[in-house]
Structure formats: structure tokens, C-alpha cells
Image: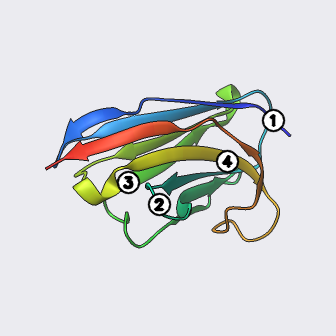
Amino acid sequence: QVTLVESGGGLVQAGGSLRLSCAASGRAFTMGWFRQAPGKERVFVAAIRWSGDIYYADSVKGRFTISRDNARNTVYLQMNTLKPEDTALYYCAAGPKGQYYNPNYSSWGQGTQVTVSS
């Protein structure tokens, strides 16, 4: 297990951009981003493997970009063309116990709020 610390959330108007960061306390081979809106389940957003393989949810393809700096044990989520429906608490995760798109990871961050106003 590693400790994860997210940053970069905030309030932005629709069409705007935000960049989330997640710093891990150690090496994490697969890292992912999930989000959870009030009253809804936590859902997959994007994941990246140590090798650089990348996966996205259909809802964010073409708008979000996940990347990582292995030397800094940090993963990023660049979010462009934000929509009100992107409003949620965004969580960083490391160490999937099964499929990367399931919210079953060994380590989770505390979450960072993203609010998109219309």
C-alpha cells in the first residue's frame, strides 16, 4: 500500500479546464482516477499503467488526459472542456485488486472536489 495525496480541484465554469495531481508515497504500478457525485456510486474515470498503457471512461474520452511522472511517483489528470456533469469528488487510487475499472484498489486518496458551473 501507498499513501496518496490529491490536489488541484476547484470551481470552474463550463468549458474550462482543471489539472488534478496525485502524489504517491512510493511506487505504484497502476494508478487510476475515479469520481463520485452526491448520491451516486464511485465510477471509473481513467487509469494508467507503469508501462504507459492508458484507459478512459467513454464519458471523458477526448476531454481528459491522464499522465504520470514515474520519477516523482505522481499521476495527473488534465481535464478540458469541463461540463456540469463532471462535478464530483475525484479520487486517486493505486493497486487495483482486479480490473482497473472497478473501484477495488488497495490505496485511495482523500478526494478533491471538482465543481463545474453552467
Quadrant of the rendering where the N terminus is positioned: top right
- Ranked by sequence position, the earlier of labels 3 and 2 is 2
For the point 44% across and 54% down, the residue is 38
Q: Work out how far the residue at label 1 is from the one at label 4, CA to CA, in angstroms.
A: 9 Å
Q: Work out how far the residue at label 3 is from the one at label 2, CA to CA, in angstroms.
A: 23 Å
Q: Are marks 1 and 2 in contact (CB under 8 Å)?
A: no
Residue at numbered disc 4: 93
- Ranked by sequence position, the earlier of labels 1 and 2 is 1
Residue at numbered disc 3: 64
- Ranked by sequence position, the earlier of labels 2 and 4 is 2
Residue at numbered disc 1: 2
Q: Are marks 2 and 4 in contact (CB under 8 Å)?
A: no
Residue density around tag 2, few if under 14, some if 14–19, many if 20 or more, within 10 Å: few
Q: Along the line of sight, which residue is nearer the eye, 10 or 22?
A: 10
Q: Amino acid at mark 3?
A: Phe
- Give the mark toward the camera: 2 or 4: 2
Q: Which mark is residue 39?
A: 2
